[in-house]
Image (cartoon, grey):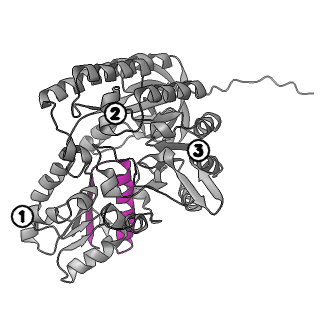
């Protein structure tokens, strides 16, 4: 059997894309290997959101140069967002790469590999640019809803991603996604429901709905429009699915009907990821985010009002073009008052092809970016740890995902597995819980009593059910 090595960089969308590619290649007889040197085909599924992710791929490609020279039949492919963004530049920087495939053409990967193997030379398949045709033509070239799934590529056997939307029309000045993922398109609700039923039949208990701005989902057919909340209500009826999560949300599309669904549906995770990016109106305007800090605060207040104890997470960019000390302190104020469960904090990285790179100077020194990143991260960690203390003494429901990272590392070093092991899982509000348990509990939802907490993790013990003897009078 031919061997496939695949390495994935980037977001959950890329993780799902890799699952679909692997499923297609398994039908061609491929088996997975963790050794890139021994693989017949090596594929890198790439990200273009930050420069570091791209350079990491070019470094990995460089390490394969000798392997390609020793074995010219080895097929090397670059797929995903960087492929769509860089296109022929990949061949120029790494001439030994055989195929470059954008996110909208991943279903063609098996055919393109065959073309390489039969002497067809380098293969390039990418979608149309945002100005290279009508919206319909461009959207069609980016379509990537593929029904093939491969359970072995999922986070766990009982958790899966479901794509409900591709592309983005927000055009934030720092973001390359609208160019590499194309126009915003929502998937037909019946196709989503069908996939959820299939996943439930395969043993999945938790699905995470994916979209660049997932709560912007809307599908119109004739006179019928399916809102995102309508879709969640329908998914809630799928037997076997116990938890529904979704990322990433756009602040202005956080409607009351969606908040009501999250509040009222027991299967819906009480967790929302809603990026703010900045606490400064001037910065949000330069980023072209489409809302003000006041509007974000109103959305957040409404969210906390509708869903008590909801966990909200956010994204922030520090050191964006023109960010002053005052702008940064406004972001710190927003973090301080919002009390996010956690925040993903990024130093601004100018991306070629974005409006920001074209019209805005990258004028904040890297040392300042690093200092602001560290300062905000420290504040967020203090908030996260303080808020996690309220779980002390409580019992929480945890979907057990498997051995903790520490336990898995130790087992790998020893080369043995033991039924009693430190396990990890997540609560309905997406908090990580670590506890001592038994492998039989993996995949189950169990009660855990919390006795300790830090900024990122809750620590607990399994709540046991005691059976007491009962006195029965015989008549």
Name the residue furthest bottom. 118
Which residue appears at 38% of the width and 49% of the height? 12
Q: Where does residue 150 sit, x and y in percent of width and height?
A: 42, 61
Which residue occupies the foreground of this view, 56 or 389? 56
Q: Position of residue 394 (x, y in %)?
A: 54, 20
The quadrant holding residue 122 is: bottom left
Residue in the image at 35% along x and 26% along y: 279
Q: Above or below — where is 116 with respect to 354? A: below
Camera sees residue 122: yes
- Which contiguous range is marked in magenta? 1-28
Residue 386 in which image quadrant: top left
Task: Write down the residue under mark 3.
Answer: 242
User: Element under label 3?
Assistant: loop
The residue where tag 1 is placed is: 66
Residue tagged 2: 284
Q: Is residue 11 above or below residue 100?
A: above
Asked if residue 5 lies in the magenta stretch, the reply is: yes
- In this rendering, the label closer to the viewer, 2 or 3: 2
* Left or right of 245, for residue 239: right
Given this view, does label 1 or label 2 mark the residue nearer the observer? 2
In percent of width and height, residue 142 lies at: 38, 64
Q: CA distance from mark 2 to mark 3?
A: 37 Å
């Amino acid at each position: 059997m031919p061997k496939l090595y695949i390495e994935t960089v980037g977001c959950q969308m890329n993780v799902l894309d890799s699952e679909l590619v692997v499923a297609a290649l398994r039908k061609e007889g491929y088996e997975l290997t963790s050794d890139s040197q021994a693989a017949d085909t090596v594929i890198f599924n790439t990200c273009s959101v930050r420069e570091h992710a791209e350079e990491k791929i070019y470094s990995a490609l460089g390490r394969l140069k000798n392997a390609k020279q020793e074995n010219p039949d080895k097929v090397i492919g670059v797929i995903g967002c960087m492929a769509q963004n860089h296109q022929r530049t990949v061949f120029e920087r790494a001439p030994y790469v055989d195929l470059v495939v954008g996110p909208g053409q991943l279903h063609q990967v098996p055919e393109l590999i065959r073309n390489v193997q039969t002497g067809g030379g380098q293969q390039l398949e990418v979608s149309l640019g945002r100005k290279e045709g009508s919206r319909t033509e461009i959207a069609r070239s980016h379509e990537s809803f593929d029904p093939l799934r491969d359970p072995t590529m999922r986070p766990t056997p009982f958790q899966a991603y479901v794509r409900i939307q591709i592309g983005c029309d927000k055009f934030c000045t720092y973001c390359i996604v609208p160019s590499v993922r194309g126009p915003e398109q929502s998937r037909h609700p019946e196709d989503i429901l069908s996939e959820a039923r299939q996943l439930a039949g395969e043993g999945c208990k938790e699905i995470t709905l994916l979209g660049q701005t997932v709560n912007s989902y809307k599908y119109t057919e004739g006179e019928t429009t399916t809102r995102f909340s309508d879709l969640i209500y329908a998914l809630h009826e799928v037997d076997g699915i116990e938890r529904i999560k979704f990322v990433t949300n756009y602040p202005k599309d956080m409607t009351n009907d969606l908040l009501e669904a999250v509040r009222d549906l027991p299967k819906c995770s009480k967790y929302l990821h809603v990026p703010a990016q900045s606490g400064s109106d001037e910065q949000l305007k330069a980023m072209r985010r489409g809302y003000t800090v006041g509007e974000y605060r109103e959305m957040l207040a409404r969210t906390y009002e509708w869903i008590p104890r909801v966990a909200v997470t956010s994204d922030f960019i520090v050191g964006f073009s023109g960010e002053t000390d005052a702008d940064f302190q406004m972001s710190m104020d927003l973090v301080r008052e919002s009390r996010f469960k956690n925040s993903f904090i990024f130093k601004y990285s100018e991306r070629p092809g974005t409006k920001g790179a074209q019209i805005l100077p990258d004028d904040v020194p890297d040392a300042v970016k690093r200092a602001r990143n560290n300062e905000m991260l420290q504040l967020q960690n203090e908030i996260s740890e303080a808020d996690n203390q309220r779980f002390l003494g409580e019992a929480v429901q945890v979907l057990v995902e498997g051995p903790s990272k520490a336990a898995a590392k130790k087992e790998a070093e020893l080369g043995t597995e033991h039924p009693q092991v430190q396990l990890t899982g997540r609560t309905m509000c997406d908090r990580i819980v670590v506890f001592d348990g038994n492998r039989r509990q993996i995949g189950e939802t169990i009660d855990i009593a919390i006795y300790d907490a830090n900024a990122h993790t809750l620590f607990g013990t399994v709540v046991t059910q005691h059976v007491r003897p009962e006195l029965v009078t015989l008549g």
